[in-house]
Image: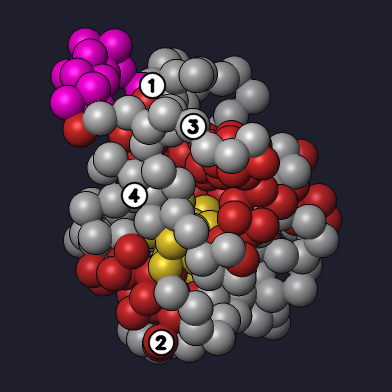
């Protein structure tokens, strides 16, 4: 236990039982990332707010072997007390949480299509109405910086301005959510959109949606929504609606 840490771990009174639930949920969603093919090997990382701290996946542990006790609780100053090291991208997660107080969960992954598109340094244009799921009329590609650095956080936060997802040049993608299911769902949507973008590029381009058409989509989503009740196997939260 870190100095100054107690069973009450935040202003909302999150306690040890709630932390156990968060650990189970984060572990389950990390394994879904791998099952959905969003991050091969030990690439990618997930986190969730835990009181004033965060829980994040450890460095170098394959998601299929991940147990709730393996997740590392990290303070916003980087302080932690765990035999395992937190993901090397913990600073990126911390910087997003500090800049975006509404964000509760983060999925950073290296899915094939999104990563391939990021290597071209291009974002995802409005080729399909689901781009609005990330909060805007397109999904940007953040500029390149070395993983685990403050420079990367700066690039990503700039690309995430008024957005909940972006590509990361020559790296992968990141998706934010009000909870873990929504962050995971959005990561999957970004991968689908990236694959569609690559396919459109192969046939020489396509017809993009207009600003007016995207505004109509956003208005329609006010009633339609992007969520449905949680799937029975998910240990926590509500899940967004299917496409």
Find the magenta span and give its range. Answer: 212-226
Estimate the x, y position of residue 23 in percent, counting from the top left.
56, 52
Estimate the x, y position of residue 233 in percent, counting from the top left.
64, 24
Q: Secondary structure at mark 4?
A: loop
Query: CA gap, disc 4 to disc 2?
Result: 19 Å
Q: What residue lies at 34% left-to-right and 79% top-to-bottom?
A: 154
**Callouts 2 and 1 close, C-beta under 8 Å:** no
**Callouts 2 and 3 close, C-beta under 8 Å:** no
Asked if residue 214 is among those painted magenta in the image, a careful observer would answer yes
Q: Residues within 10 Å of mark 1 (few under 14, many from 20)?
A: some
Can residue 162 be seen here?
yes
Query: CA gap, disc 2 to disc 1?
Result: 34 Å
Query: CA gap, disc 2 to disc 3?
Result: 34 Å
Q: Which residue is mark 3?
A: 206
Q: Nearer the viewer, mark 2 or mark 3?
A: 3
Q: Residues within 10 Å of mark 4 (few under 14, many from 20)?
A: many
The quadrant in which residue 226 appears is top left
Q: Earlier in the sequence, mark 4 or mark 3?
A: 4
Q: Earlier in the sequence, mark 2 or mark 1?
A: 2
Q: Earlier in the sequence, mark 3 or mark 1?
A: 3
Tag of residue 227: 1
Q: Earlier in the sequence, mark 2 or mark 3?
A: 2
Relative to 122, does residue 195 appear above or below in the rendering? above
Tag of residue 151: 2
Return the residue found at the far front. 204
């Amino acid at each position: 236990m870190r100095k100054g840490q107690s069973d009450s771990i935040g202003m909302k009174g999150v306690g040890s039982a709630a932390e156990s639930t968060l650990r189970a949920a984060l572990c389950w969603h990390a394994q879904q990332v791998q099952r959905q093919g969003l991050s091969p090997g030990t690439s990618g990382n997930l986190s969730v707010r835990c009181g004033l701290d965060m829980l994040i996946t450890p460095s170098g542990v394959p998601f299929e072997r991940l147990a709730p006790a393996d997740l590392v609780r990290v303070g916003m100053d980087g302080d932690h007390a765990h035999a395992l090291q937190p993901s090397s991208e913990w600073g990126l997660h911390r910087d997003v949480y500090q800049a975006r107080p509404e964000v509760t969960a983060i999925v950073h992954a290296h899915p094939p299509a999104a990563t391939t598109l990021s290597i071209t340094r291009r974002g995802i244009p409005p080729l399909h109405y689901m781009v609005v799921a990330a909060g805007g009329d397109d999904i940007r590609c953040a500029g390149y910086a070395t993983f685990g650095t403050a420079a990367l956080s700066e690039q990503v936060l700039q690309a995430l301005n008024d957005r909940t997802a972006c590509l990361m040049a020559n790296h992968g993608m990141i998706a934010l959510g009000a909870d873990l299911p929504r962050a995971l769902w959005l990561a999957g949507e970004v991968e689908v959109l990236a694959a569609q973008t690559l396919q459109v590029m192969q046939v020489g381009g396509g017809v993009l949606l207009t600003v007016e058409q995207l505004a109509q989509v956003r208005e329609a989503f006010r009633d339609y929504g992007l969520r449905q009740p949680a799937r029975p196997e998910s240990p926590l939260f509500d899940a967004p609606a299917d496409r």
